[in-house]
Image: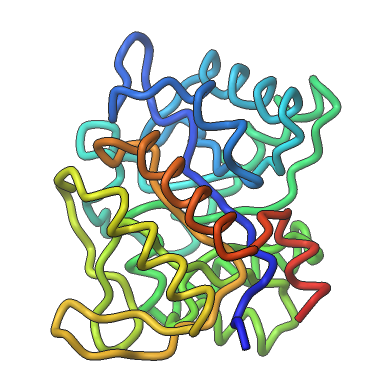
Amino acid sequence: MTYRRLIDINCDMGEAFGPWRLGGVDDADLFPLITSANVAAGFHAGDPNHIDRSVQLARQHGVGLGSHPGYGDLQGFGRRTIKAPPAELMNDVVYQMGAVREFGRRYGVPVRHVKLHGALAVDAAVDEALSEAFIELLRTYEPDLPALGMHAAVTCRIANEKGQPYVREFYADRGYDKSGRIVFARQVTRPDPEALAARVVKACQEGTVETVDGETIEIPFESICFHSDTPGSLDIIKAIRAGLEQVGIKVVPFSEVMASV
């Protein structure tokens, strides 16, 4: 039996600043191929003009809009830890979520989810206090707003305990360790799109992934994540979509995936 016959595809979007863009791909080429967009809000990447454009592209293509808050680390692209009290970091998260929400209101596009970025997500995955602060923020701020993230994360457990919706991700272009967490990389080399597509298809069919150590582990998920800044991201998503279509797996918003579980 196929593990997932319906699957969401999400991508981190708007990760540019002024005239600078990572990955060399125009987001306009990626939006037609995804169902959920995680929009950078200016702390690790992005600026008002890029947020504005991302929201308009989401509306144009019927893509679910999400906010993508990270550490205030433009120079390091949010991939460096900032040591600060959880309450202070949550103020940064509120600020970023508000930016994306207000641009969404401008164009009549509701925010459908939130996803922590980079080192902030990786840190929260193992930090009880940070995850507790994030989920408590959502319970107060938007108790029906799904958070996206790793299944093998403290954040996932706390969200489930407190009743906050949580969408588990499979990371197409990141390695896994035996704990089920991603192997964090500050620099990503260009991967083989066909190899990644085969990995995604296998995960959807079997619910498993091979770790960087060669072990096979179970990996529950409702959404596939790939990153727009990964070199060759357009070729990657085209290969993934073709691979899923070939085996009859339909790409839909994660709300439909969750309803089918």
Q: Position of residue 97 (x, y in %)?
A: 62, 43
**Residue closest to the far top:** 19
Q: Is residue 30 left or right of residue 216?
A: right
Residue at (59% x, 55% y) in the render: 245
**Residue closest to the far front:** 246
Q: Is residue 220 left or right of residue 257?
A: left
Q: Position of residue 31 (x, y in %)?
A: 58, 31
Q: Looking at the rendering, in which quadrant would you find the C terminus?
A: bottom right
Frontmost residue, 64 versus 157: 64
Q: Looking at the rendering, in which quadrant would you find the N terminus?
A: bottom right
Q: Position of residue 134 (x, y in %)?
A: 56, 66
Residue 56 visible, this orientation:
yes
Q: Is residue 41 above or below residue 198?
A: above
Residue 119 visible, this orientation:
no
Q: Is residue 62 left or right of residue 38?
A: right
Residue at (66% x, 54% y) in the render: 251
Frontmost residue, 95 versus 186: 186
Q: Is residue 19 left or right of residue 160?
A: left
Frontmost residue, 152 versus 254: 254
Q: Is residue 178 above or below residue 232?
A: below
Q: Is residue 2 above or below residue 200?
A: below
Q: Is residue 112 above or below residue 106?
A: below
Q: Position of residue 12 (x, y in %)?
A: 47, 42
Q: Quadrant of residue 199?
A: bottom left
